Image (cartoon, rainbow, N blue to C red):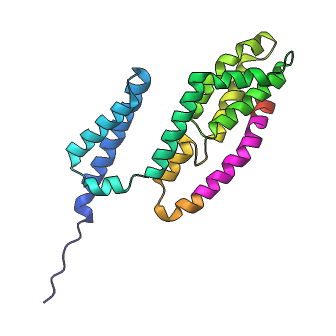
């Protein structure tokens, strides 16, 4: 006589759905508290992870083994490097050296390429916040403020979708292990092409406003 065990998938489905919903709530709380109340996003993330662990008692070994540590270390190192560059004022010095006197449109093109190249290995939001204060002199010279902001924002964001950037790194980390090598090559190819193409396209589309 053969005894067939009942499948456990239906019983586990409500628990998994509840865990996913609660995870989304914790992620939303981290975003709101970090952006709206300027709280440390690192401590918030650790607190959310601790709450999830206490609520659902997930197997720690399995959770830790599925963390893409190579992506985490890569992004952490790049953010440290970019933060040092910002602290030393490297972005402003580069932009000042490359600025074209008396030609605000050409200076905007230079800033778009500075933002795009830097966003390849850094947070696009941080890069955009760094280069935006360099726009007022160009606006005083006749550049459209709306067009300049849009050109810089898109030049920073479009390049960020590569394996060395924040967005591309998160996508790569969430992918299955079997597809990561191919996805890495695809994202890297897109990133290298977008460094050349994206700043010029955004400048041509919005710099003339």
Q: Residue at x 55, y 39 (%)?
A: 78
Magenta-tinted stretch: 184-201
Above or below for 116 versus 63: above
Residue 135 figure quarter: top right
Residue 57: image location, x then y, percent: 21, 50
Q: Which of the pair 106/86 is nearer the observer?
A: 86
Q: Residue at x 79, y 28 (%)?
A: 109
Task: Tell me: 55 left or right of 198.
Answer: left
At 47% from the left and 51% from the top, the residue drawn is: 70
Could you say which is closer to the camera, residue 207 or residue 46? 46
Q: Is residue 152 left or right of residue 121?
A: right
Q: Which residue is at the far right?
A: 102
Residue 115 image-quadrant placement = top right
Q: Which of the 4 image quarters holds residue 186?
A: bottom right
Residue 64 lies, in percent from the top left, at: 33, 53
Is residue 208 shown to the viewer in this render? Answer: no
Q: Nearer the viewer, residue 142 or 112?
A: 112
In what quadrant of the picture does the N terminus appear?
Answer: bottom left
């Amino acid at each position: 006589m053969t005894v067939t065990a009942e499948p456990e998938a239906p019983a586990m489905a409500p628990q998994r759905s509840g865990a996913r919903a609660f995870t989304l709530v914790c992620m939303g709380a981290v975003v709101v508290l970090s952006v709206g109340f300027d709280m440390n996003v690192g401590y918030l993330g650790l607190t959310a992870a601790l709450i999830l662990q206490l609520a659902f008692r997930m197997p720690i070994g399995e959770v830790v083994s599925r963390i893409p540590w190579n992506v985490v270390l890569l992004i952490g190192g790049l953010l440290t490097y970019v933060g040092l560059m910002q602290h030393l004022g490297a972005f402003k010095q580069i932009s000042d050296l490359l600025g074209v006197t008396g030609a605000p449109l050409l200076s905007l093109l230079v800033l778009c390429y500075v933002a795009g190249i830097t966003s390849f290995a850094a947070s696009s939001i941080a890069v955009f916040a760094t280069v935006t204060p360099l726009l007022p002199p160009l606006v005083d010279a006749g550049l459209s403020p709306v067009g300049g902001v849009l050109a810089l924002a898109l030049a920073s964001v479009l390049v960020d979708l590569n394996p060395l950037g924040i967005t591309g790194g998160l996508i790569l980390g969430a992918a299955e292990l079997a597809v990561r090598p191919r996805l890495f090559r695809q994202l890297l190819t897109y990133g290298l092409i977008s460094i050349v193409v994206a700043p010029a396209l955004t400048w041509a589309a919005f710099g003339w406003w």
